[in-house]
Image (tube, helix red, strand yellow):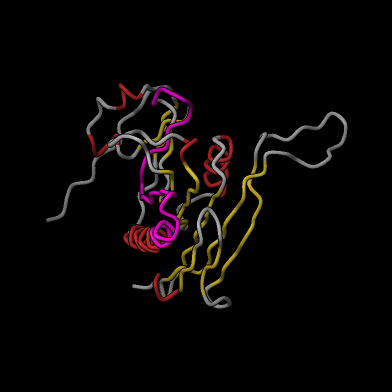
Amino acid sequence: MPTTPVERPDLPERMTWEELGQLPDEIAGEIELWDGRPVWLRRAPFEHQEYTNMLWAALRRCARAEMSRQPERCWRVATETNIFFGRDGKSDFVTPDFLAFRCLEHEYEDVRATDVLMVGEVLSKSNSEQDIEAKKSRYAAGGIPWYWEVTLARNPRRISSVRTYALETGHGTLPDGVSPLHPANYLIAGEWIADVHDGITFDYPFPIRITWEELEF
């Protein structure tokens, strides 16, 4: 049965987590708080969700395989889970498409940026370059070591490429009086193209081996 789209209300310039919780779930679930500033998430098509779920399943398989070899290691792989910045408080968070983080001590514990090893975004034409860079800079400022970008193609629909970026906390020599806009940034560390490479092979944050066939539907 089709559902009626929910009209987005006007929001104040700043909100707290508690104020966000007073909104209907279908509205609150489409909002991130960037240092207390509400930011709308873009609605994604079915293919976006499907490829996100496939990546989650593949990465989860890889994490579990490594944990079976090294029982002292423990990771979790998830989709669309809030990452909260800072040691406490919840009014500064983002929601990546997929992520990997260290196992938490308690059930239902909030995921903090310091717990996260990798975040990823599945990009589509609705994502502007400005939006992508803004969110990437927040991940970098949070100290998350690895960032993935997944690009989708059409006709036929498929994952066309995957890029992984490593966090760089230093910077090169700059002219006198010039400083970087962001204190931390990502450098591309790997790229896999569906028509060129056999699959995705990378060793961080745990050994990852994924074939393109595993990401088809």
Q: Position of residue 62 (x, y in %)?
A: 42, 62
179 or 6: nearer the viewer: 179
Which residue is depicted at the point 54% across and 50% down?
Answer: 147
**Residue pushed farthest left?**
1
Range of magenta residues:
62-90
70 or 207: nearer the viewer: 70
Which residue is depicted at the point 41% across and 76% down?
Answer: 213
- 173 vs 98, left or right, is right
Residue 88 falls inside the magenta stretch: yes
Residue 117 falls inside the magenta stretch: no
| Vertical placement of residue 166 versus 89, above or below | below
Which residue is depicted at the point 43% across and 49% down?
Answer: 72
Q: What is the quadrant of the C terminus in the image?
A: bottom left
Which residue is depicted at the point 39% across and 36% down?
Answer: 111
Q: Quadrant of residue 101?
A: top left
- 179 vs 159, left or right, is right
Q: Position of residue 140 (x, y in %)?
A: 58, 40
